[in-house]
Image (cartoon, coloured by chain):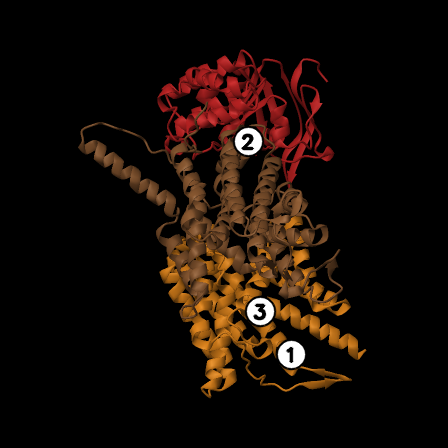
């Protein structure tokens, strides 16, 4: 069966439009802000994949974003050339997630308890990193720096040529390629049996078990893949900010990505991307003024979205759009009894 | 010998601290399966209420034991009516909405009080224990914590309200069949939980110093304790987990540094949750309440 | 151990706290046999069922459960299913947010390759009669239809042992007849155990019956013998303690 309505398909038209916009952007506008928005988008995409399609809500997903950032910084300070650090920034979060995931999923931990455990993991990292001020906290040549973090490390370079730094517009393109590439990977996963089994697990885990699927293994795998993407996003963030501090592990950072995914639309891939870019932009704009507090706006948005648009903006817009098409078709006299299949990913346990 | 007494007192204080900040969340989670992530901010609000009263010249005992719980209870009532009651049965949505609320409350408090730390003077002077200078106020915290839990237990066990509450903990139908509107029960429960959080915040204000972001520290510990305690027997469970976490965290702190003590507590939480997915009470205290 | 036995339990015992739900049960099912498990509420049938499916985790202290000679005690449900066992649970367990076809596809995919899954799904749709509702979301369907979808899911895996817990629950009349026909059809290629309360349904199946009472096997045998047994009637009406 080629098509699964519940999983959706890539719309090549929109995708190519997106590619075109991203490619052409630097000609018209500054790339500094878009670079970080792309990194945020990738981070949100990673959570959206795991949460929306496999039904796994990791409260502390920012732990892997942060790990990616820290691993890159530490590795590039020690190695000097950026290819291996980039790969490590993807591999180490994936490995850590595999361990923690296996521990949770083979122990039948899910829902609330998974939320707590994943949150605790990021809190541990936050507390630990904050306490590493002092010269004794080094990994190789890299001082961990406590709450001040790690500043002044080399940015990504062209693989194999450490003098050719990718700072500036090239970094934007790296981020764009990363996002587009990971989006395609997500679509590919969802088009394969692996992705469909994940959706089945989200819908009814015990039934999938009774169909012979090794559910803990599937969950651990997607958790690890999602962490790898988050780590990549963290690496991009580190390159953009040129400093890595423990705030990447904070409760606040953990909340932000969840808000982005929720507002954007759980159960879609595009929703989290757009949600992250929009709200990331809002965050940057708010950060520059002190009249209204950041937290206030973010909190207000979250509450309103949960109450009013529980499925997120993108699904709401899609629903509205389809409704209008149907009305227009009916008015024009074509009977288009298109059944809208209920595909809402539910967040509830 | 003196040192031993100091250690014991510090451990008791830590247990009391965790138990106090967890009480409100435990009631709400145990009764309604609602995870209120704004709980930490309720505690923080209790502290700021005490601060405001203290600045206004109101007697501090009255402020922390009466006014703080009342004010936060009101806030809790508003929150329940405006937000929570639309989300019953949607656990994750409730968590997300209350997370939003917590950010909102932090923002509001920052607007009113500013973002720098403020403190409230401790109304009980220190005392000498051998060669150690002890905070007398810590003893008060321990006493309040004990009194609080005993009071809650008594109410649940021996009063009609307590019976209805315990029934509603099992299922909303029980409350209805006893003639009480479950929605009303939930509203009252949430308000009471908020009051307890406010009390905790008010009482702890002299000790911990106040920041709009203090809530964050409270919620993490409270959340972990309540979930570890489990849904089976909320009071016993939360007490058990508070004892475990308080003791381990303090002992490790004494053996090394406070940071490692906190890390030990967090690590223990992961181990505990992994080994006992239904929480401590789900495993050990199936028949208590 | 009987060489022909597809399922065999040896001294299977399962306790919950102080209650012994299954008490040293020795049970045998031969290849291609169809057997009904009946008994009043609390007799232990469903517990027994869940011991076979791995939904209750057992250890060596619970006795032995052999499926085609392999001791499945301690195995997870998915491991048991992968051996070739199809399971329908007491409460319909299907993926409510997905369509009927998607449900069937997931069931078929594990045992058939990517290329053949589509054909297998179509085969099951035709066999079970799900054509009208194939593209509907399962959550929207009526209870009886969902039961049939679950039967379809079991079929799509091509199992050689089928365990059905209360397949007739909540369905009546023509649907029950259809179900009986389906089970007979399944029985042509697989061994089947059916747990149910509905005496009419059990009578219609016309298969060997095992009666459970208070965690043990009261009697077993062909339908006419068992259903006319006075002890069985007493146990159902409750004259005996």
How far across and down, in percent of the image, does residue B155 sit?
Answer: 51, 67
Q: Which chain is brown?
A: A
| 3D distance between C-alphas at marks 3 and 1 | 13 Å
Q: Which residue is mark 1?
A: B139
Q: Chain of mark 2?
A: A
| 3D distance between C-alphas at marks 1 and 2 | 58 Å
Task: Name the element at disc 2.
Answer: helix
Mark 2 surroundings within 10 Å by alpha-carbon count, few (fewer than 14), some (14 through 19), many (20 or more) = some
Give me the residue at 67% from left, 42% from top. Answer: A160
Front-most of residues A346 and C146: A346
Mark 1 surroundings within 10 Å by alpha-carbon count, few (fewer than 14), some (14 through 19), many (20 or more) = some
Q: Which residue is mark 3?
A: B20
- Please identify which colour was used for chain C in the image: red
| 3D distance between C-alphas at marks 3 and 2 | 46 Å
Q: Is residue B170 visible?
A: no
Q: Is residue B259 above or below residue C119?
A: below
Q: Is residue C104 above or below residue A253?
A: above
Mark linked to residue A194: 2
Task: Name the element at disc 3.
Answer: helix
Q: Chain of mark 3?
A: B
Q: Which chain is orange?
A: B
Please state, as top left, top right, bottom left or bottom right, where the N terminus of chain B lies in the image: bottom right
Front-most of residues C221 and C204: C204
A309 left or right, relative to C19: left
How far across and down, in percent of the image, does residue C241 sit?
Answer: 57, 34
Same-chain check, marks 1 and 2: no
């Amino acid at each position: 069966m080629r098509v699964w309505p519940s999983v959706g398909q890539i719309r090549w038209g929109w995708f190519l439009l997106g590619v075109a916009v991203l490619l052409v952007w630097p000609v018209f506008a500054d790339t500094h802000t878009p670079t970080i928005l792309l990194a945020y988008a990738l981070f949100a995409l990673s959570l959206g994949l795991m949460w929306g399609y496999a039904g796994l809500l990791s409260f502390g997903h920012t732990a892997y974003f942060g790990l990616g950032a820290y691993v890159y910084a530490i590795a590039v300070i020690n190695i000097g050339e950026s290819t291996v650090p980039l790969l490590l920034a993807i591999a180490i979060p994936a490995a850590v997630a595999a361990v923690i995931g296996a521990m949770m999923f083979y122990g039948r931990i899910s829902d609330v308890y998974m939320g707590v455990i994943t949150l605790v993991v990021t809190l541990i990292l936050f507390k630990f990193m904050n306490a590493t001020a002092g010269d004794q906290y080094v990994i190789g040549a890299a001082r961990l720096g406590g709450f001040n973090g790690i500043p002044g490390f080399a940015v990504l370079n062209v693989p194999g040529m450490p003098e050719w730094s990718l700072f500036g517009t090239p970094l934007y393109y790296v981020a764009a390629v990363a996002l587009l590439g990971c989006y395609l990977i997500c679509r590919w996963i969802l088009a394969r049996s692996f992705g469909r089994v994940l959706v089945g697990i989200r819908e009814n885990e015990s039934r999938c078990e009774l169909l012979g699927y090794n559910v803990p293994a599937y969950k651990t795998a997607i958790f690890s893949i999602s962490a790898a993407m988050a780590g990549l996003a963290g690496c991009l963030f580190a390159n953009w900010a040129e400093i890595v501090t423990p705030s990447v592990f904070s409760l606040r950072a953990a909340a932000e990505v969840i808000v982005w995914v929720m507002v954007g639309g759980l159960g879609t891939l595009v929703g989290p991307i757009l949600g992250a870019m929009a709200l990331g932009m809002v965050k940057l704009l708010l950060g520059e003024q002190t009249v209204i507090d950041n937290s206030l706006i973010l909190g207000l948005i979250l509450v309103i979205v949960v109450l009013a648009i529980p499925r997120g903006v993108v699904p709401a817009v899609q629903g509205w759009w389809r409704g209008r098409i149907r009305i227009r078709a009916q008015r024009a006299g074509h009977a288009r009894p298109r059944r809208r299949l209920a595909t809402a990913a539910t967040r509830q346990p | 010998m003196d040192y031993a007494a100091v250690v014991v007192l510090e451990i008791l204080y830590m247990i009391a601290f965790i138990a106090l900040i967890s009480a409100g969340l435990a009631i709400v989670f145990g009764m309604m399966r609602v995870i209120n992530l704004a709980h930490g901010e309720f505690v923080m609000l209790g502290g700021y209420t005490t601060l405001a009263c203290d600045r206004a010249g109101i007697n501090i005992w009255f402020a922390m034991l009466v006014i703080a719980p009342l004010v936060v209870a009101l806030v809790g009532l508003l929150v329940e009516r405006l937000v929570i009651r639309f989300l019953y049965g949607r656990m994750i949505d409730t968590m997300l909405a209350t997370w939003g609320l917590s950010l909102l409350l932090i923002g509001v408090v920052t607007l009113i009080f500013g973002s720098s730390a403020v403190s409230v003077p401790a109304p009980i002077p220190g005392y000498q224990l051998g060669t150690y200078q002890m905070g007398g106020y810590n003893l008060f915290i321990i006493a309040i914590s004990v009194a609080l839990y005993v009071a809650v237990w008594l109410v649940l066990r021996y009063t009609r309200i307590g019976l209805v509450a315990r029934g509603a903990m099992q299922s909303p139908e029980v409350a209805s069949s006893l003639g009480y509107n479950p929605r009303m029960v939930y509203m009252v429960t949430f308000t009471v939980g908020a009051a307890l959080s406010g009390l905790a915040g008010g009482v702890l204000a002299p000790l911990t110093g106040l920041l709009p972001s203090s809530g964050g520290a409270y919620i993490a510990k409270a959340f972990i304790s309540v979930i570890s305690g489990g849904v089976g027997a909320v009071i016993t469970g939360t007490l058990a987990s508070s004892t475990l976490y308080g003791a381990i965290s303090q002992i490790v702190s004494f053996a090394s540094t406070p940071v490692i003590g906190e890390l030990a507590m967090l690590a223990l939480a992961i181990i505990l949750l992994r080994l006992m997915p239904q929480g401590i009470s789900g495993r050990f205290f199936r028949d208590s309440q | 151990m009987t060489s022909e036995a597809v399922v065999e339990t040896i001294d299977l015992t399962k306790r919950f706290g102080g209650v012994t739900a299954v008490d040293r049960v020795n049970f045998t099912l031969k290849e291609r046999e169809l057997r009904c498990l009946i008994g009043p509420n609390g007799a232990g049938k469903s517990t027994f069922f869940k011991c076979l499916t791995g939904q209750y985790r057992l250890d060596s202290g619970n006795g032995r459960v052999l499926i085609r000679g392999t001791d499945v005690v301690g195995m997870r449900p998915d491991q048991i299913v992968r051996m070739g066992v199809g399971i329908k649970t007491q409460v319909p367990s299907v993926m409510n947010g997905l369509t009927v076809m998607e449900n069937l596809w997931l069931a078929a995919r594990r045992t058939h390759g990517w290329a053949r899954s589509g054909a297998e799904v179509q085969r099951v749709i035709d066999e079970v009669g799900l054509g009208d509702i194939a593209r509907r979301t399962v959550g929207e369907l009526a209870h009886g239809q969902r039961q049939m979808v679950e039967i379809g899911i079991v079929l799509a895996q091509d199992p050689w042992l089928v365990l059905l817990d209360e397949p007739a629950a909540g369905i009546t009349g023509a649907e029950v007849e259809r179900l009986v026909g389906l089970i007979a059809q399944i029985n042509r290629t697989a061994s089947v155990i059916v747990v149910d309360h509905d005496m009419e349904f059990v009578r219609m199946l016309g298969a060997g019956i095992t009666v459970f009472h208070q965690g043990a096997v009261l009697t077993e045998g062909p339908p006419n013998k068992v259903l006319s047994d006075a002890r069985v009637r007493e146990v159902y009406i409750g004259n005996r303690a």
